[in-house]
Amino acid sequence: MKTISSALKTKVIRPLILLFCSSIGTGLISIFSLYIMVKSLGVETYGALMLAFSYIMVIGSVVNLQSIDAIIKFIPYEKSTILKTKLINKLFLVDMITAVLGFIVCYASISFISEILSWDGLVSELLYIISFYILFNISGTFEGVYRYYGYFKWISFRNFIVAAITCLLYYISSNENLEVEYYAFVISISSLLVLTLDFIYFCIKKNDMGYRGFRFEKVDVKIMKYTITSNINSNLDLPIKKLSPILIANLMSLQDVGIYKILEKLGAIVLKLISVFVQFFGAEISRLIASGNIKKVLKLGKRFTTLYIFFSFSIIFISYFGFDFIVTITSPELILFKNEIFTYLIYIVIISSMFYQHTVAIYSGHEVKVLKLILSVNLLYLVCLQYFTDTWGLIGLIILQIIQAIVIFFIKNKFISDGLRGTVK
């Protein structure tokens, strides 16, 4: 029993604790970065910066593919180091080509999209600066490899270092009273920081992984199709995350964009903690599915959802009554958005409680069905968006996202359940 206990601590408990601690540390740094930017730039200018970044991320999500899910899904089936190396090289190539293509598409479309959406000169200028973010956003394969081989210490360390460096640069810009363009430059090089650190670590660990070296490999249609489908699923799912600020800017004001992005940043702290489970158990879920056993995953996932929602809603209820005191000390202007903030927190709790479901769905052969589902639901989301925002403003947008999340959750669950019963072919 002592041997089993020791193995459990080494393989599961210690890495999980490390990931949680680093995620909390990274989250606190992110909150401080947010505080610096909002205080230095003001909500409206911060909104312009985030509007530009959101457009870059929309283009990136469509063109700049990331191969995290493809690596984790297919690598368990490759039984030799030679085959694993070939798979890694294929997906490296996909990441690199689509990053360059994404940058070209983004840079070339800025003038046109700014004119169509009537964005002012500042937003256009920020777009040109931040577009370089896509060019260096080539870490999908690295991330998938590190998760599969269990290099969670590195993932934690890398995320913490990048967050700390960018926060330091924001702090310097605040002290020097630099313009918003400098903040855009920091955002643009953050992907380069991630890429550089990942490349260095990969070179250090490549022999341990049995990696045989890079060479050009022809990408299989099956792998390419899955990579495209999983990327679309991830970027459109719950809800059209990166597109929302652009939609808000055309229906409301830059201040609303700023407030929404503040809510997103705060919500991202919770999602970052939940992503620990995805990082740690994603590869194991893939292995279980490859061996034909996912019932245990679903059972544990449902228990997690129930307990997580109960405890999270309890914390939200208690926090609601202490909100005014805390915000008065830090950011008094946020008092006006108390209801929006707590509605958004409810939304974050709902989607984060379902973390296991998306992973199971796309690794168990339902990625095409899920894609059709989210395209249909997101179309309804866009149809209803103006009514909800015109009627209830920013809080209407958040309520609509909650409705969308719940609909997708229940239909996805039906796909998985039908698949287990053998009714979905």
Image (cartoon, grey):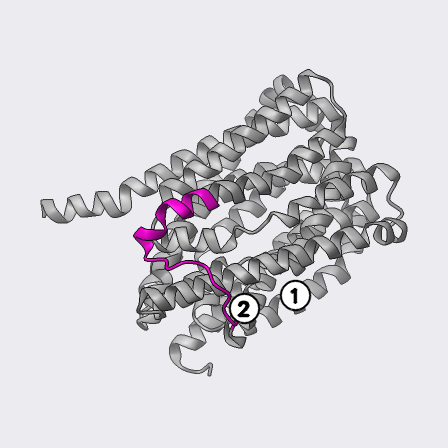
Q: Is residue 382 or residue 139 the one in the foreground?
A: 139
Sequence-wise first label, 2 or 1: 1
Vertical order, 408 against 190 (above or below): below
Q: Nearer the viewer, residue 266 or 87?
A: 87
**Which amino acid type corresponds to the residue marked 2 in the rendered image?**
Ile
Would you place residue 259 above or below residue 103 in this image?
A: above
Regarding mark 1 in the picture, which secondary structure is present there? Answer: helix
Secondary structure under tag 2 reads helix
Check residue 12 for magenta coloring: no
Name the disc covering residue 377, or none.
Answer: 1
Q: Mark 2 near mark 1, Cβ–Cβ under 8 Å?
A: yes
Numbered disc total: 2
> In the drawing, does residue 222 fall left or right of residue 101?
left
Q: Residue at 75% across / 26% down in the picture?
A: 42
Q: Is residue 119 left or right of residue 334?
A: right
Task: Tell me if residue 210 is in the magenta stretch.
Answer: yes
In the image, taking residue 387 as reference, residue 185 lies left or right, namely left
Q: Percent x, y for residue 167?
A: 58, 27
Mark 1 surroundings: few (<14), some (14-19) or many (≥20) residues within 10 A: some
Q: Which residue: 39% across, 38% down?
A: 20
On screen, 17 above or below 172? below
Point out residue 175 in the picture as x, y percentages from the top left corner.
Answer: 67, 16
Q: Nearer the viewer, residue 80 or 214?
A: 214
Q: Residue 369: give its label.
A: none
Residue stretch rendered in magenta on the structure: 199-219
**Which residue is depicted at the point 21% across and 47% down?**
8
What amino acid does circle 1 point to? Val
Is 247 left or right of 170, judged from the image as shown? Answer: right
Residue 248 visible in image:
yes
Q: Is residue 394 above or below residue 177?
A: below
Quarter of the view holding residue 418 = bottom left
Identify the mark at residue 411; answer none if there is no mark.
2
